[in-house]
Image (cartoon, helix red, strand yellow):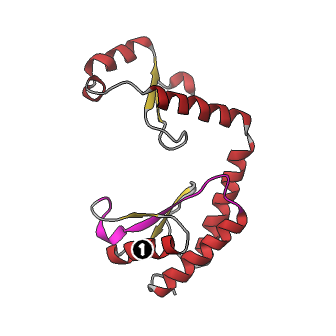
Amino acid sequence: MSKDVELIMGTFSKSLATIGGFIASNKDVINYLRHHSRTFIFSASITPAATGAVLAALDVMKEETWRPKQLWANTNRMISSLRAAGFEMSNTTTPIIPLYVRDNEKTFRLTSMLMQDGVFVNPVVSPAVPSEDTLIRISLMATHTFDQIDEAVEKITKNAKLLGIIK
């Protein structure tokens, strides 16, 4: 299939924990983009620090092959535990897990309550999403333990019940 793909793009901000991105293609496509893409024309090159971070992250990915397996195990545990607790979720299969709250104020309150309990989540509210689709976003890492995941689920569940998000 890769023979049929003309252009590959990716970001460094999600999987490589830095800023920037890349586009890979043949010389003609790259030259066209260099001269006709406004966002490229008015952007700066990647910084040496960000380049170093990308290279270091790639080294870790090559050397520590256990990380993706552990990340998926953590993801599956968190998703199944949250579903069992009665949370409304999309059909997500990624380590960035959206948990619907569907109320701006409750989303902020839940985020604050969880922070006080030592669980960091990100609120996603209007106008980033429609007001009826507000949510908290949970981001997992391979280095989270099952005990930490179970504790986070307990705290999320406890606080969501206090706010009437779940029964």
Q: Determine which quarter of the picture holds residue 32.
A: top left
Q: Is residue 163 left or right of residue 38?
A: right
Q: Which region shows up in magenta?
A: 128-145
Residue, disc 1: 101
Residue 50 percent location from the top left of the image: 48, 32
| Residue 88 seen from this side | no
Q: Please, is residue 10 above or below residue 129 in the view?
A: above
Residue 151 percent location from the top left of the image: 65, 73
**Residue located 49% across and 70% down the image:** 115
Q: Is residue 67 left or right of residue 129?
A: right
Secondary structure of residue under mark 1: loop
| Residue 142 seen from this side | yes
Q: Please, is residue 103 above or below residue 32 in the view?
A: below
Q: Is residue 153 left or right of residue 28?
A: right
Residue 152 percent location from the top left of the image: 60, 71
> Label 1 neighbourhood size at 10 Å, few (<14), some (14-19), many (20+)?
many
Which amino acid type is marked by label 1?
A: Val
**Residue located 71% across and 61% down the image:** 145
